Amino acid sequence: MSPKTVHQILDDPDFLELVRKKDRISAILTALELVLYFGFIALIAYNKAYLAEKISAGSSITIGIPIAVGVIVLSWILTGVYVFWANGKYDPMVKAVKEKMER
């Protein structure tokens, strides 16, 4: 059989499903990351006094430090969620679409 044309690939239902699923997870994780990051920036902009409070009376660590670390850690976790999803769902779907297109 002859190779598939670009239009045949782009119109293939399996390829379109692959694109929809990738776009959905990307949009969800991007939205979560933006809310997380800009929420922290908004907290810095509008409530500096809260972030400057000490965690405890004798501590030199402010509330802002663990929140900032939390933003970083949650960003890594969201990246891990995407990697886990890509390895478990996306990559097998890509492989199946590639095999289908090679036939």
Image (cartoon, rainbow, N blue to C red):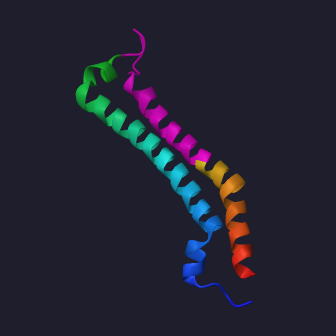
Vertical arrangement, residue 63 with respect to residue 81, above or below: above
Magenta highlight on residue 67: yes
The residue shown at (73%, 74%) is: 100
Quarter-of-image position of residue 14: bottom right
Q: In this image, 46 relative to 30: left or right?
A: left
Q: Position of residue 31 (x, y in %)?
A: 43, 44
What percent of the width, then of the height, locates residue 96? 73, 67
Q: Quadrant of the N terminus?
A: bottom right
Which quadrant is home to the C terminus? bottom right
Q: For the view shown, which residue lies furthest in the bottom direction? A: 2
Q: Residue at x 56, y 82 (%)?
A: 6
Q: In the rendered view, tell whether residue 57 sits above or below residue 62.
A: above
Q: Which range is magenta?
A: 54-81
- Tell me, yes or no, whether the highlighted magenta stretch contains residue 37: no
For the image shown, how many numbered marks are present on the structure?
A: 0
Q: Nearer the viewer, residue 100 or 25?
A: 100
**Residue found 69% across the figure and 70% down from its top:** 97
- Is residue 77 or residue 30 the one in the foreground? 30
Residue sticking out furthest to the top: 57
Residue at left 31%, top 36%? 41
Main SS class of the magenta portion in the image: helix
> Where's residue 54, x and y in %?
37, 16
Q: On the rendered structure, is 94 left or right of 38?
A: right
